[in-house]
Image (spheres, helix red, strand yellow):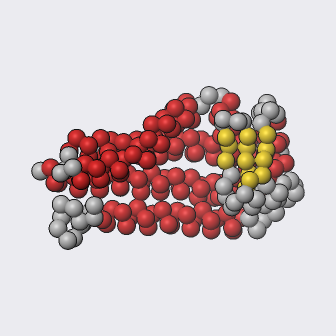
Amino acid sequence: MIGYGYGLFDPTFILIIIGLVISLWASWYVKHNFNKYNQYPSQRGVTAKEAARFILDKAGLSNIQIKQIQGDLTDNYNPGDKTLNLSESTYDSTSVAAIGVAAHECGHAIQDQKNYVPMRVRSAIVPAVNLGSNASFPIIILGMVLGMNHFLITIGIWLFALVVLFQVVTLPVEFNASRRAVNILDSGDLLTSEEVPMVKQVLFAAALTYVAAAISTALQLLRLILIFGNNRE
């Protein structure tokens, strides 16, 4: 598809490069901040697992299990089976960064408990988004193979737009979870007042990865519109 409608040089490819640069920078930035504050053991000496258990129990979520999973920064909350999954680099760590990550995932569990609307919307559109993610480009390619079938190409672009929608809906979910985490940790039960700003840096960097993903995906959508809109004209 590169170069289509523009001869040998496709000026829209710069959009892909911009998105890639933004994503790589965001990935580096979150790892840089996590590694930096992962060197600071919390003064109260609690592990991320213990901090998560404390937060969940205090929120009335003692039914949620905490599990260790493989990977580095693969932490997540699963609303399906009500489990909070902490990665190997987080689970037993007493670092300020690890506690911040665990608190963030607890924020998602609290969102689930309180039926936070953006989280419900995101969960509701997952099937459609999966369809869009898997089928959009095959349908666009099929449309090109069938002599530039604009109906199929338009369907493919709309399906890809669902992926962009998902990325956008994810933003308030992630920022709200981080805000809940900071408010919880700011109470002083788990971290000192000097350590909370460190957590803010880690969670802000993590949130930027979602912003970068949304921008990168939106740029891909814009490129598709430019390429095929130009050809239609």
**Of residues 231 and 117, which is closer to you in this image?**
231
Query: In the picture, residue 223 is in which quadrant?
Result: bottom left
Q: Nearer the viewer, residue 186 or 29?
A: 29
Quadrant including the N terminus? bottom left
> Relative to residue 69, is residue 17 depicted above or below?
below
Q: Is residue 120 left or right of residue 180?
A: left
Query: Is residue 118 visible to us here?
Result: no
Residue lying at 52% horizontally and 52% vertically, measured from the top left: 210
Q: Residue at x 83, y 57 (%)?
A: 92
In the shown orientation, is residue 149 left or right of residue 190?
left
Is 112 placed above or below 227 here?
above
Measured as percent of width and height from the top left, residue 155 is found at 29, 41
Q: How many marks?
A: 0
Q: Farthest residue in the bottom direction?
A: 8
Of all residues shown, which one is farthest toward the top?
115
Q: Is residue 99 above or below residue 18?
A: above
Residue at point 71% right, 64% down? 37
Give the residue at the far left of this rendering: 233
Where 126 falls versus 147 (above or below)? Answer: above
The residue shown at (81%, 50%) is: 49
On the image, the x and y values in percent for residue 144 come to: 23, 53
Query: x, y (%) of residue 102?
Result: 73, 50
Task: State whether residue 70 appears in this view.
Answer: yes
Residue sticking out furthest to the right: 45
Quadrant in the rendering for residue 35: bottom right
- Is 76 left, or right, of 118 in this rendering? right
Q: From the viewer's side, name the closer residue of 152 and 47.
A: 152
Tell me residue 228's x, y (percent). 22, 52
